[in-house]
Image (spheres, rainbow, N blue to C red):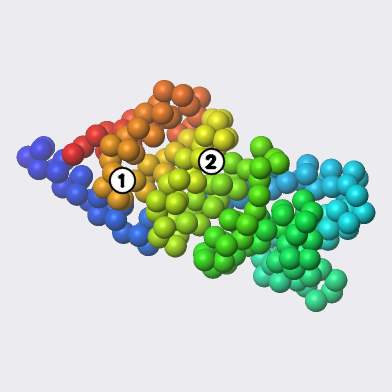
Amino acid sequence: MAKTNEQKSSLNVDDALNNSQAFFLKHQRGLLYVIAAIIIFIAGLILYENYVAAPREDKASTILAKGQEYFDGGAFDKALNGDGAGFPGFTRVASDYSSTKAGNLANLYSGLCYAQMGKWQDAVKYLDEFDGSSDQMITPAAEGALGNAYAHVNQLDKAVKYLKKAAKDADNNSLSPTFLIQAGEILESQGKKDDALVLYKEIKQKYFNSMQYQEIDKYIERASTK
């Protein structure tokens, strides 16, 4: 009887993982977590741009700061498309100031706004345009956001790729376990339990000071069940 119940439980887990709508809704929280981390990192960057950068860069970053206010307040449409009162919107900043760091950052903000509005194809487009090579703090969070966006448009292999990369680049007890679990659950939904198990064991072995460590055994047990 216990074995039968265990089999039923395993089937229920697999059914849940293969339900794409439930799966993606579950990861909304993960995306919000990524966004919160990005905002913290970006604040310092914008301060630098406002006081140190060249005139064109300074103008772009000043405009960007207004958009950040809308973004932080949840006014994603205004942040994205402008307010009709001087702020042109992140997409316009990304286009008009594409050669600046602020313009590059506007791509990231545009992608995050689209994600918040549930427009995932557009989110992918702008998040992919963001070049985080010059900032090692923002890059992992941006990669994680892109991984989540790919998951929402059902490009699961790319989602796993970017989530794993984000975990590696972050290499900390906060972001890395979050991204590894997300990647592992996607792999499980694809029937790749062995690959998922590798990621869960990495959390167990490397991120023992993380919150996720407290419940990682249940993920390992689930992925170990054939």
- Residue 115 locus on image (x, y percent): 56, 61
Q: Distance between the residues labelled 2 and 1?
A: 19 Å
Relative side of 10 to 58, left or right: left
Q: Quadrant of residue 123?
A: bottom right
Residue 184 visible in the snapshot: yes
Residue at screen point 78% across, 66% down: 96
The residue at the point 14 percent across, 43 percent down is 7
Residue 161, given in percent of the width and then of the height, sits at: 45, 45
Task: Identify the image quadrant of the C terminus.
Answer: top left
* Callout 1 amino acid: Glu
Q: For residue 44, which quarter of the picture? A: top right
Residue at x-position 28% and y-position 44%: 192
Q: Is residue 34 among what the camera can see? A: no
Q: Mark 2 highlights which residue?
A: 166
* Residue projecting furthest to the bottom: 84
Q: Which quarter of the rendered picture does the N terminus lie within?
A: top left
Q: In this rendering, is residue 21 above or below 197?
A: below
Q: Which amino acid does label 2 sit on?
A: Ala
Horizontal and vertical percent position of residue 62 = 86, 56
Left or right: where does residue 134 sit relative to residue 29?
right
Disc 2 or 1, which lies upstream in sequence? 2
Question: Residue 222: where, in percent of width, then height?
Answer: 27, 38
* Residue carrying label 1: 188
Left or right: residue 67 compared with residue 133: right
SS for dot 2: helix
Residue projecting furthest to the front = 99
Who is closer to the viewer here, 126 or 115? 126
Asked where in the image residue 75 lies, by quadrant, the reply is bottom right
